[in-house]
Image: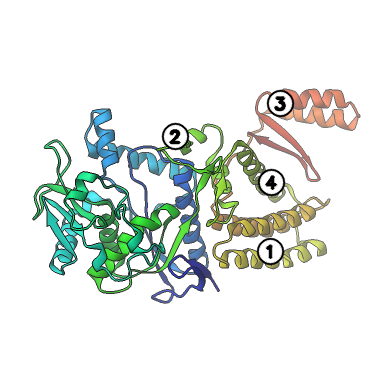
């Protein structure tokens, strides 16, 4: 039985979906004005894994992740690059898809864009005005924060202590327009004619950040979500404001389970573009493949912090390599192992695989404990390697072992990329391999090593196994 730590209740709760066998899940996506960094990538990977696990357990998941494609940062980037805001956002949406694919992040069921739902946003805002929870002021529209009973229930903040305003994107000029400094923007009047804007009952303007997600989640998932997720930094004000808007508009609970991932830190400080202490995924991909970065993100519990440094990258690369070597060895055994039924020892080993699967499930059921799930996979790898290394190992065992390894790794989004390819062995290379084998048999190890190094210089690795020489190309 799956248990989720619910930020709203601050405890682990048994997951019970609104509709049996189905899950409606909304995850806050990127503001598309730049390449995303490894800290931004954490929620993408974590909640993609949650989705994969729910699907593994038989749920039909409708997974919505938005793009914030109108925002002050996008407008500023457009000015810097001398292009339109829409050109900026479309450019970085495409770049998002490239880097997300490298991390094995599956595309959402729907990737809505704020600019594509402007009429829905205007209708949503007008309803809040009609209900007395919002008001227009000089072309802006604000939400009456104090009027919403229970404001602060997600973040645990006391409304009387929130004197800085409920939006991190406010200014003193904006505060002068408000009835109360705590009120946050639903709609923002256009400041200059060149700024991106849409017609509305309150004049030319654009939506505030928070109302975008409330509108998109309602449009594609309905009034109540099973799971709403995002980074820890979004608890307040973004998710708190979403709750206030949505529950006022919809008249019902907005989300039953709230999940938030912890930060990726550098020297104990949260990685962020504003501090300049970040590494983009695009840059990291020049040194490490995307599965290494995914392994890094999943190697710790999603709610805890990760300290990002060169050592953890190397540890992640080595950990993933251990899994990849197991897969590579099994593939070789499938090709070159003994035919026929499994040996008695192999059959016993395969019978024991269920225990590793159960350890994996137990870990994932315990609030998506991917760190312990990876440990279960490593235990499986050890058991596989022990049996696969025996003389006379069979193809039948290799296939059963590969099925189990890939079943669990696929849930984690690992071992999906082919990093090695088999070599088409031409006669010249085969002659060298045969000569090396003859040299080894004659105990002429100097010549054998010379041939191995000669092939390695061509990117060809020879691996000696009980089933013969495995030839791989890096």
Position in image of residue 236 (x %, y %) = 37, 56
Residue occupied by mark 4: 322
Residue occupied by mark 2: 276
In the displayed structure image, the side of residue 433 where residue 292 appears, left or right: left
First in sequence: mark 4 vs mark 1: 4
- Please determine whether, in this image, residue 393 is positioned above or below residue 452: below
Between the residue at mark 3 and the residue at mark 2, the CA separation in whole angstroms equals 44 Å
Is residue 285 in sight in this rendering? no
First in sequence: mark 1 vs mark 3: 1
First in sequence: mark 1 vs mark 2: 2
Is there CB contact under 8 Å for labels 4 and 3?
no
Q: Quadrant of residue 438?
A: top right
- Secondary structure of residue under mark 2: loop
Mark 2 closeness class: few <14, some 14–19, many ≥20 residues within 10 Å: few
First in sequence: mark 3 vs mark 2: 2
Q: Quadrant of the C terminus?
A: top right
- Secondary structure of residue under mark 1: helix
Between the residue at mark 1 and the residue at mark 3, the CA separation in whole angstroms equals 38 Å
- Secondary structure of residue under mark 4: helix
Query: From this viewpoint, which residue is outermost toward the right?
Result: 443
Q: Which mark's residue is nearer the viewer, 3 or 2? A: 2
Position in image of residue 39 (x %, y %) = 47, 45
Q: Quadrant of residue 301?
A: bottom right
Residue at the spot 39% in from the left edge and 76% down from the top edge: 19
């Amino acid at each position: 039985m799956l248990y989720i730590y619910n930020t709203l209740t601050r405890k682990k709760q048994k997951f019970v979906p609104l509709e049996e066998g189905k899950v409606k899940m909304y995850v806050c996506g990127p503001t598309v004005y730049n390449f995303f960094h490894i800290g931004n990538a954490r929620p993408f990977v974590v909640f993609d894994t949650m989705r994969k696990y729910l699907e593994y357990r038989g749920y039909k998941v409708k997974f919505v992740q938005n793009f914030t494609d109108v925002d002050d940062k996008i407008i500023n980037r457009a000015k810097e690059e001398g292009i339109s805001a829409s050109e900026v956002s479309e450019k970085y949406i495409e770049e998002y898809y490239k880097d997300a694919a490298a991390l094995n992040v599956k595309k959402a069921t729907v990737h809505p864009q704020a600019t594509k739902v402007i009429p829905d946003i205007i209708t949503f805002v007008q309803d809040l005005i009609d209900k007395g929870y919002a008001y227009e002021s000089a072309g802006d529209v604000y939400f009456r924060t104090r009027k919403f009973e229970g404001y602060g229930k997600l973040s645990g903040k006391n409304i009387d202590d929130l004197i800085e305003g409920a939006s991190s994107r406010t200014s003193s000029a904006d505060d002068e327009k408000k009835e109360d400094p705590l009120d946050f923007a639903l709609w923002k009047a256009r400041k200059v004619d060149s700024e991106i804007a849409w017609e509305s009952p309150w004049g030319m303007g654009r939506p505030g950040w928070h109302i975008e997600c409330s509108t998109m989640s309602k449009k594609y998932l309905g009034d109540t979500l099973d799971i709403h997720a995002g980074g820890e930094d979004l608890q307040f004000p973004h998710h708190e404001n979403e709750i206030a808007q949505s529950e006022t508009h919809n008249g019902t609970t907005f989300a039953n389970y709230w999940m938030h991932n912890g930060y990726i830190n550098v020297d104990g400080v949260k990685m962020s573009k504003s501090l300049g202490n970040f590494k983009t995924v695009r840059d990291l991909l020049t040194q490490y493949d995307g599965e290494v970065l995914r392994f890094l993100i999943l190697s710790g519990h999603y709610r805890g912090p990760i300290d990002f440094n060169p050592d953890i990258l190397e540890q992640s690369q080595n950990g993933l390599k251990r899994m990849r070597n197991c897969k590579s060895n099994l593939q070789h055994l499938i090709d070159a192992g003994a035919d026929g039924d499994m040996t008695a020892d192999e059959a016993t080993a395969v019978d024991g695989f269920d225990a590793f699967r159960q350890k994996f499930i137990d870990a994932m059921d315990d609030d998506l404990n991917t760190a312990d799930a990876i440990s279960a996979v490593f235990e499986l790898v050890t058991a596989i390697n022990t049996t696969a290394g025996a003389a006379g190992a069979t193809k039948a065992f290799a296939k059963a072992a590969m099925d189990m390894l890939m079943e669990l790794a696929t849930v984690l989004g690992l071992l999906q990329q082919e990093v090695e390819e088999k070599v088409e062995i031409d006669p010249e290379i085969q002659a060298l391999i045969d000569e090396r084998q003859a040299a080894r048999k004659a105990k002429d190890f100097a010549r054998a090593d010379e041939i191995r190094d000669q092939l390695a210089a061509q990117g060809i690795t020879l691996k000696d196994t009980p089933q013969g020489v495995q030839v791989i190309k890096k």
